[in-house]
Amino acid sequence: MMSLAPETPLLAVRDLWAGIDGKTILKGVNLVVRPGEVHAIMGRNGSGKSTLAHVLMGHPAYEVTRGDVFLDGRDLRDLDVTERARAGLFLGFQYPVAIPGVPVTGFLRAALRARRSGGSESADVPVREFRRTLLGAMREAGIPEDFASRPVNEGFSGGEKKRLEVLQMLMLKPRLAILDETDSGLDIDALKAVADGINRGIAAGIGVLLITHYQRILDHVKPDVVHVFLDGRVALSGGPEVARELEERGYEWLEAPGEAVNPASLGTR
C-alpha cells in the first residue's frame, strides 16, 4: 500500500452545505486540518458548530446537499457512521447518554474490537491485552480503577461523563477526534483533568477538532488554528489570539457590514 503524500490533509471539508428537516444550517464550510494539528471552533449557539460535528460523523438525520469531506484523502460521503468510525473518526458528545446495565469495560472492549478488526468476532481483543491497555489509559486520564465496573454514564457526574469520553478517545486512538463542547459544565479541577487527557491524545498523534464556547479550555489545550462560525460559515480563522479577542469583544464586531478582519492584527491594541 502506498504511503500518503506529505501534503495530504488529515481532514478536508470543501464548500459543505448541509441541514436537517429541510433547514439549511451549514452554508459553504471550508476547513483543512493537517496531521498533528489542533483546531478550535467557536461561535454562538445555532451557528452550525454541532451540526458540523454530526455531519462529519455521518448522522443520518442530516442531509448534505453540496460539498465534499475527505479523511486522509478518503471520500467520506458514502460511508455510514460505523464505517467512518473505523476509518478513524471519533465524536465526543456534548451530552453523553447513559447505557444502563452495560459496564464500562464491556462497552470499551466491544468498541476496541470494532475499531481494530472491522467488527470481526474472530479477531477479538485478548483479555490481558485489553486490561493492560485499559488500565494504562485510565492512568493517563486520571480515572480510578473502580470506574471500569460502573454502567456507562449511569449516575455519572458531568465531569465523569466527559472523562469517559476522553478515555474512549485514548483507547480507540482515532485519526481525528471531534470533541463537541467537552468542557461544558466542568468545574476547574474536572476541566484540567479532561484537558490533560486530551493533551495526552494529541501527544500520541491524534488530530483534534475542539468545539467550544469558551477561552478557558484553550488555556490548557493549545490550538494551532481557531475558526469562528457565524450563520453556518467560517467567518474568521486565525491563531489563539482569535479566541482571546472573542472573550473580550463577543461576536458583534465580526458582523459589522463590510468589516474585513486581518487575524494578524488581533490582540495588538
Image (cartoon, helix red, strand yellow):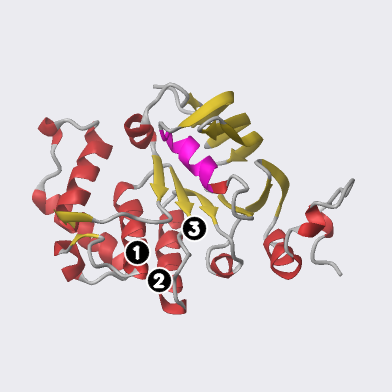
Looking at the rendered image, the disc whose residue lies closer to the viewer, 3 or 2, is 3
Q: Which mark is residue 163?
A: 1
At 76% from the left and 66% from the top, the residue drawn is 249
Residue 120 in the magenta stretch? The answer is no
Residue contact between numbered discs 1 and 2, judged by CB atoms under 8 Å = yes
Please say if 122 is above or below 128. above
Residue 213, horizontal then vertical, whole percent: 58, 61
Q: Main secondary structure of the magenta part?
A: helix
Q: Nearer the viewer, residue 258 or 215?
A: 258
What SS does tag 1 mark? Answer: helix
Please say if 165 is above or below 53. below
Can residue 7 be seen? no
> What range of the chain is rendered magenta?
50-59
At 54% from the left and 67% from the top, the residue drawn is 217
Res 153 quadrant in image: bottom left
Q: Which mark is residue 193?
A: 2
